[in-house]
Amino acid sequence: MPKAKNSDIPPQYEAAPLIRRLLFEHAFLHWKRYVIAFLLMAVVAGCTALPAYLIGRVVNEAYINRNFQAIFAIGIATAIIFAIKGAATYGQQVLLTRIGNRIVADNQRRLFGKLLTESLGFYADRHSSEFIARLSTGAAAVTQTLNLLITAIGRDLLSLIALVSVMVVQDPALALVSFVVAPPALFVLRKLIRRIQSIARSQFTGGTHILETMQETLQGIRIVKAFTLEDTMRARFDANIAAVERDANKMARLAARSSPLMETLGGIAIALAFIYGGYRVVETGARPGEFFSFIAAFMLAYEPAKRLARFNLDLSNNLVGVRILFEVIDAPPSEPSDIGKPDLKLVDGRVSFDNVHFAYRADEPIMRGMTFVAEPGRMTALVGPSGGGKSTVFNLLLRFYDPLDGTVAIDGQSVIEVSRDSLRRQIGYVGQDTFLFRGSIRENIAFGRPNATQDEIVAAAQAANAHDFITGFPNGYDTPVGEHGLQLSGGQRQRIAVARALIKDAQLILLDEATGALDSESERAVQDAIAHLCEGRTTLVIAHRLHTIQHADRILVIEGGAVVEQGRHEELLRKGGRYAAFYRLQLQGQQDPEPRQPLAV
């Protein structure tokens, strides 16, 4: 993967614009809580600096004034200060965590909502694991960045200011000597930022590949085992893990480079403070209390100073995750909003394609002037070779895609002129590869109409020939279907899908080879269920098994992106054209083949 350069980052995703955006879109929504957290951090900073100041008083009272009462009073005050510091630390941590959890949840909702507005084309060349990674990594990065900003200012900067104030009050000259090491540290740390950004992006990509391989392996575990692909998938997974490990090691080396620098420079500063301060106490008679107070403040200031020195490194790392999230959220929706468009007013359910042209890729046309009419209340079957455009008819009707030219209309209303929601609400769809969601059988049927009653769910299942096998399960309608419905057989899944379409009570039905993958017994049960579903409704059927659509009111033979023949079954057989050729070919395949000579080897 090529190393990212700073110029590769779009201007809106550079550090300053991103931080401003985070402040306006998220921090300002919770400004009251952030103010309280900031004030609590100020209390923590003050309580950190006060003991350093009081150490000097204790030393002077003990060794110079010999005043035990004053030492006792300072001890009690110190205990109270640390108790206040503990309470303030607890309060600011709880507040920041609650704010962070809310921001993570809001961004996860935003990203998921954005994904729901995308078209099928958006997902065609992407893997679902990418969005899982963006959902987890990106949403968390927003909170981490804001927390880093508020803690850097509220905790570290205020603590450093308070402690430096103690140092300046105790010995201004010594404070100046201690700060001479700061400029070299800042100069070196700036050099690491660009490398951090590049490696962080590479780590995200590698993590996505890990999720991708695991998800595909688990979802395709039957194929993995059937084709003995265990070693292949293990090698692929190991390669992804190794790539992420290498990036993680690079990140560790880069991030850790600041430690020896800071430790060395800090040691130099402390040595200078010891030498100069000790010289003043021993040679010039300065009071030891101020020296001890200065050293205590200096030692306490070391940690916040080190965190602030690393601030840009940590910020750059977190901003990579923020960019990953916003890249999806900010992208123009591939399925633009059609709020304001009129609803589809479906009366009869007459479907028409008028000279429709379409291509998924610019140089590969799928439809070349597709023209036909599906009459209301009738069954229209689409047959023909693969790649001819049958499934594209359904994709255009459901507005997964829009035609490049021509008109797709229902009852004379162009589908691109009405809202997608009203269009899809009035279409029932059953596909060959039935998708069931995680949950119970009841929930999956109710997805057709979420407000359906139990009686309506049972009625739909009965009409779909599913009620008997459902009630045969110990948990009945509450039986979980498993991931993708794998707890059920293919025929059972299809009948659940038919019940889901039945309960929707749509006027227009689309069946995409709904029985193509079933055995004869399951096919018969599903065909009976489909007969209930299609009764009195406009139905379009994609079929490869021609015997399933012999009674269709009209059969369209689609080839090369156009309708080359149409008519009823008997009529098309008499014509002796493409349909008759398909039918004879399937009929021969169903008969017992004559013995064949073995292939020559």
Image (cartoon, helix red, strand yellow):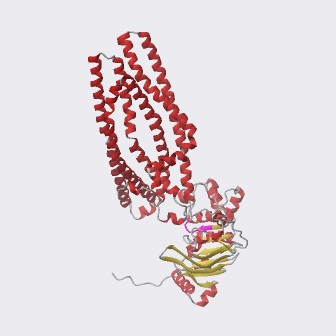
Residue 155 vertical placement versus 368 (above, below): above
Q: Is residue 415 left or right of residue 595?
A: right
Please tell me whether the stretch drawn in magenta is mainly helix, strand or loop. Answer: strand
The outermost residue toward the right is 347
Note whether residue 465 is visible: no
- The magenta span reads 429-433
Residue 318 is one of the magenta-drawn residues: no
Q: Is residue 219 above or below residue 155?
A: below
Relative vertical location of residue 197 with respect to residue 491 in this rendering, above or below: above
Residue 401 visible here: yes
Image quadrant holding the N terminus, namely bottom left
Q: Is residue 256 left or right of residue 409?
A: left
Residue at image location 40% in from the left, 84% down from the top: 597
Closer-to-camera residue (57/540)? 57
The spot of residue 119 in percent (x, y) is 55, 64
Q: In the rendered image, which quarter is residue 357 located in?
A: bottom right
Q: Residue at x 55, y 70 (%)?
A: 519
Rendered-image quadrant of the C terminus: bottom left
